[in-house]
Image (spheres, rainbow, N blue to C red):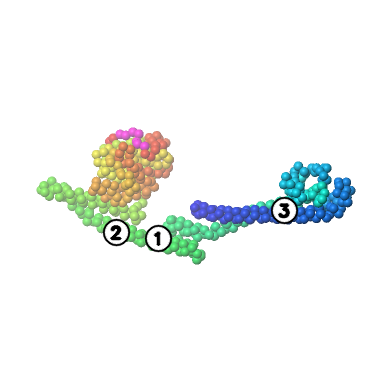
Amino acid sequence: MSALRGVRGRLTITIVALVALTATLLGVASYVFVDYSLHDRFQSDAANQARFDLSVLIPQSLPEITRGALNDSRLQETFQRRDVVLAATFGGDVTPQFAPLLSPEFNAAVDRGELGYQWLTLAGQPTFIVGGNLPETDATFYFLHDVTSIEAALSALRIGLVVGSIILIVVALIAARYVARGVLAPVDAASRAAERIERGDLGARVPVTSDDEFGDWAETFNRMAASLETTIDELEDAQAHNRRFVADVSHELRTPLAALVAEASMLREGLDELPDGSRRAGELLVADVGRLRVLVDDLMEISRFDAGAEQVVAEQVDLVRLVTAVIAARMPEAIRSVPPNLVLVESDPRRIERIVGNLLDNAREHASGAPVEVSLRLGKDLMTVIVTVADRGPGIPEDRLPHVFDRFYKADPSRSAGSSGLGLAIAAEHARLLGGELGASNRDGGGARFELRLPVTRPLPGGDLPAIGEGEDQGQEPAAKEPSR
C-alpha cells in the first residue's frame, strides 16, 4: 500500500506541476502582452498628440514663442486638464529639473528634430515624457504624462494572475487526487485482493469495472488467481493423500512390525548358538528390524503432526533435572553446563525430552568420537530459556544449513545410512508446538550448534538468573563445563 500511495502521490504531483507550469507560462505571456500593448498604445497616442500640439495648438496659442508669452497664456492650464504637465526651454534659458534624468538617446532624437520618448519616475510617480522642438524656433517643449493608471492596471493584473494561478493549482491538486484515486483504483483493488490471497483467501478477485487496459489487467489477475487457487487445491489434495498414505502405511506396518520386533528379540538372544555363517546374517536382520521400527515410529509421529492430533500437556518442569536426566540416558559422556539450582518453566516435559534426545542422537551420529557439550542458560531478552547441544564434529555445509530441519533431509547422505532423516524435523515440530524454535549454526573452530529456545511464560525464580548466564548472547559458548555424572 505504501508503494501505491507513492505512485498516487507522484501522479498527483505530476498533474499539479503540469498545471502550475501551464498557468505560469500563460500568466507570464499574458502579462507581457498586456504590458507591451498598454505602453505601446499610450506611447503612440502621446506621440500623435505631441505632434498636433507642436504643429497646431502651441503656435496658435502663443503670439510670440517666448517664456513670457507662455506664462501669460493659459496653455499650461489647458494641458493640466488633460493630466499633462507642459515644460519648455527657450534657447536653453532654463534647464528643467528632470533634464539630468533624460537619456542621451532622448536628447539626440530631440536635437535631430524628432520626438523623444522616455519612461521614468519623477517624484515617486511613473511618468512618460515626450519632447520635441517647435519648428523654426529654438524652443523645446516637454509633455509629461502621468501614467499611474497604467501601472495600477498592470499591478492589478499581476495580483490577479498570481491569485488565479494559486486557485488553479489548488483546484488542480483536488482534481489530481480525485483523478489519481480513480486511475489507480484497480491497482488498489488488486493490492487488497493480493493481501487477502496472502492471508489464505484464495477466492479473492479484482472487480472488472472498465473495458480499457485496467479492465484487461484485472481479468488477467483474476485468471491468475483462479489458476493459483486450482493449483493450491490440487497440491493440498495431493498432500492430504500423501499424508493419509503415510499414516495408513505406518499404521498397517505396526502389527507385522511388532511381530518382527518380537521375533528379532528372540533371534538376538540365540545369536551365539548360530553357526558363524548364519550369525552375521542374524545380526544384520536384528539391526534392520530395529531401524525399521524407528522409521515407522517416526512416520507415525509425523503423521500425527500433519493431522493436528498432537496436543501439548503443560506442567511445571525443572529444566535442569530434565536435561540432566536426558543426558544421562542418551549420552553420559557429554559435557554439560547447567545451573545447580531449579529452573522452572511451564511446558511439556515429554516433548522437551524428545527434542534434546534427538539432538544428542544427531550429535552421536554426525560427530562420533568428538566432544559434545550441552548447556542451559537464560536468553539475552530474559524471556527465553536456551538449551544448546554443540559438538566438535565436521559441522554442516553452509548451503545445507537452511534444510537441516526438512523431512528426510540428510546433510551428509554418505554418513547417514542408518538414519531416517526425520529426527531433526520431529524435534523442530515439537519446538513449534511448545511455542519455541529450534535453530542450527556452525561453531567457530569446527562443529555444529543446535539451540532450542523455549518461552518463559512467567518470571523465573530470582535465584535462577545468575546461574544460567543472564544476558548472554545467542552464540556465546558456555562459561563453565563439567562432565556429566
What mark, if any, has residue 245 been given in the picture? Answer: 2
Which residue type does callout 1 highlight? Answer: Leu
Tell me which numbered mark, 3 or 1, is placed earlier along the sequence.
3
Which residue type does callout 2 highlight? Answer: Phe
SS state under label 2:
helix
Left/right placement of residue 121 relative to residue 300 reads right
| Residue segment shown in magenta | 476-482
**CA–CA distance in space, label 2 to label 1:** 25 Å
Q: Say if 70 sits above or below 392 in the image.
A: below
Label 2 or label 1, whichever lies nearer to me, is 1
**Magenta highlight: main SS:** loop
Residue at (33, 38) in percent of width and height: 444
Q: Is residue 270 visible?
A: no
Could you tell me residue 255's position as x and y percent? Answer: 23, 56
- The answer to whether the residues at label 2 and label 1 have Cβ atoms under 8 Å apart is no
Which residue type does callout 3 highlight? Answer: His
Tell me which numbered mark, 3 or 2, is placed earlier along the sequence.
3
Residue at (33, 33) in percent of width and height: 480
As rendered, which of 187 and 273 lies closer to the eye? 187
User: Which residue sits furthest front?
Assistant: 136
Instruction: Find residue 202 and report its image quarter.
Output: bottom left
What mark, if any, has residue 442 been given in the picture? Answer: none
What mark, if any, has residue 228 been given in the picture? Answer: 1
User: Which residue sits furthest bottom?
Assistant: 211
Tell me which numbered mark, 2 or 1, is placed earlier along the sequence.
1
